[in-house]
Amino acid sequence: MNRLDELWATGRMPLRDGLFRADGRSREAAVEGAGLEHFRLGGPIDLDGAGEAGTGDGPDGPDEPGEPDEPVPADIHVEAELPGGAGRVVGGGGSHGSEGFLARLGADGSVVWLMHLGRSNEFVRIAVDWPLATFTNNCGRSLTLDLASPDFSG
């Protein structure tokens, strides 16, 4: 079992902004706020290092030295089935109102990937029009992902 599986099994997720995949690939991820403007994926990050003190190189600028990056609860608010029994996508929030997350789960419920966005607000709606999934936050702003792309595929 990998670190992402371990966190998901206990209902938690990494606090650090990023796209974390069960296959071990992880990348920085960021939006500029609850308006979900300027979504971007950045360079690789280490999920195993996400439980340690801040690295000083967050996607939105320097972290405070020694800032804890403890896992936080992943509260699912919405989910949608994917076609052909390919699993489902879920969205929700964490322990702070400003953070949100998106995840793709396999048919067996295991996490395929999880994306934490500390400034996105909670996600409360999902619309799937394969291969696109549109996640809408509690401010009515949306982020559309291509679930067939290498970063978001299953």
Image (tube, rainbow, N blue to C red):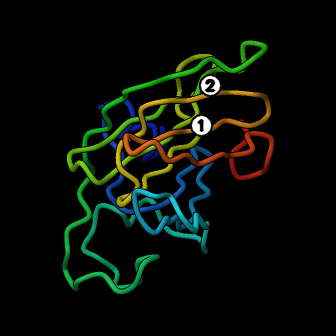
Location of residue 118 in the rendering, given as x and y in whole percent from the top left corner:
35, 59
Residue denoted by label 1: 112
Crowding at label 1, few (<14), some or many (≥20) Cα neighbours within 10 Å?
A: many
In the figure, 46 relative to 20: above or below?
below
Crowding at label 2, few (<14), some or many (≥20) Cα neighbours within 10 Å?
A: some
- Spot the residue most to the top: 85
- Spot the residue most to the front: 140
Q: Residue at x 25, y 40 (%)?
A: 73
Kindly state the secondary structure of the residue where label 1 is placed: strand
Q: Label 2 sits on what residue type?
A: Gly
Q: Quadrant of residue 87?
A: top right
Location of residue 109 in the rendering, given as x and y in whole percent from the top left corner:
53, 20
Location of residue 5 in the rendering, given as x and y in whole percent from the top left corner:
45, 37
Location of residue 12 in the rendering, given as x and y in whole percent from the top left corner:
31, 39
Q: Label 1 sits on what residue type?
A: Val
Q: Is residue 117 left or right of residue 26?
A: left
Residue denoted by label 2: 106
Q: Residue at x 78, y 13 (%)?
A: 84
Q: Residue at x 36, y 42 (%)?
A: 122
Q: Is residue 54 left or right of residue 152?
A: left
Please state which of residues 75 and 43 is positioned toward the viewer in this rendering: 75
Q: Earlier in the sequence, mark 2 or mark 1?
A: 2
In the figure, 86 relative to 147: above or below?
above
Q: Quadrant of residue 78?
A: top left
Image quarter of the C terminus:
top right
Mark 2 vs 1: CB contact within 8 A: yes
User: Of the numbered discs in the image, which one, if any, rests on residue 9?
Assistant: none
Kindly state the secondary structure of the residue where label 2 is placed: loop
Q: How many marks?
A: 2
Q: Residue at x 49, y 64 (%)?
A: 31
